[in-house]
Amino acid sequence: MKMPFNMTKYHRVQPSPWPFSVAASTAIFLTGMLEWLWNYSLLGLIWGASAMAFGCCLWWRDVIREATFQGKHTKLVQRFIKTGMLLFIASEAMFFFSFFWAFLHFALSPSFEVGMTWPPQGIVPPNAWGLPFLNSTLLINSGFTLTWASRAVKEGSKWSAAAGMVMTIALGVIFMAVQMKEWWDAPFDIRDSVYGSCFYMMTGLHGLHVLGGLIFLFVCLIRLLRNHFSTARHLGLLCAIWYWHFVDVVWVLLWVMVYVWGGWTEGSFLQYVSKGLHLS
């Protein structure tokens, strides 16, 4: 019987224990985080993080073998992987969109509980042109260095690409350090009104995405140094570049909306818009 399509173009994934292992270790990690918040015990947190890292490394090892050494990622499979990555980024965009929507809702129509003003009474918003502006500069420059690395890979310049990726990772690490400094010095916390909740949820989740992007780029850097990429085949790096640029764009929007626009004080344009909505 003749097959309607060529099965050799598709990759039938073999049974693997790593998806279950990573899922179970993630559950342990989250349980350990709750235990740390309630009892200040790090045992479950460390155990879950270690098991999750171990499972991810072995899972990535198998995927890299399939893509680089076994040749199972055909052009059709690569197209499906690209589509999956784009859909994943779109789902993450919708995730951030919900928090932007919440921030706009409370900022444009502040309720009686927050003093009918934005930022709420007693909240001193961070200076948008201080550490947040520095972080914006760092992430924007990291996008340029990563683009440089991408072009170097396409041109076959291994060490130039490695230099660009190292600079990107370094800028991302500095971004995380500056973000932690800002949280440490902030005059409010996540319990302080809806502003604190939105602020820390949005910046904290973005920080987690930056951490994920740094791990993604670090794995790609190791693969680059081990000659896993060529001028024609570097799908893993391409997905990492897409993800990092997504993180860049989200931060720029976050900085403009939360720090610049949402942090204006009494008498600003935001206040007039808010009062106009109340009058209507």
Image (cartoon, helix red, strand yellow):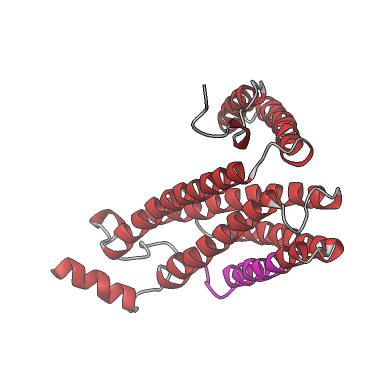
The residue sitting at 65% across, 55% down in the picture is: 238
Q: Is residue 120 above or below residue 83?
A: below
Q: Is residue 39 above or below residue 219?
A: above
- Left/right placement of residue 28 relative to residue 92 reads right
State the image quarter where residue 73 is shown.
Answer: top right
- Left/right placement of residue 226 relative to residue 211 reads right
Type of secondary structure dominating the magenta stretch = helix
> Which residues make up the magenta segment?
126-147
Which sits in the foreground, 71 or 111? 71
Whether residue 189 appears in this view of the structure is no
List x then y, in percent, for residue 257: 43, 67
The residue sitting at 73% across, 32% down in the picture is: 62
Which sits in the foreground, 4 or 104? 4
Which sits in the foreground, 239 or 190? 239
The residue sitting at 81% across, 63% down in the picture is: 156
**Residue furthest out toward the left:** 280
The residue sitting at 79% across, 60% down in the picture is: 166
Whether residue 113 appears in this view of the structure is yes
List x then y, in percent, for residue 247: 57, 58
State the image quarter where residue 54 is shown.
Answer: top right
State the image quarter where residue 42 is shown.
Answer: top right
Q: Is residue 268 above or below residue 90?
A: below
Q: Is residue 142 magenta?
A: yes
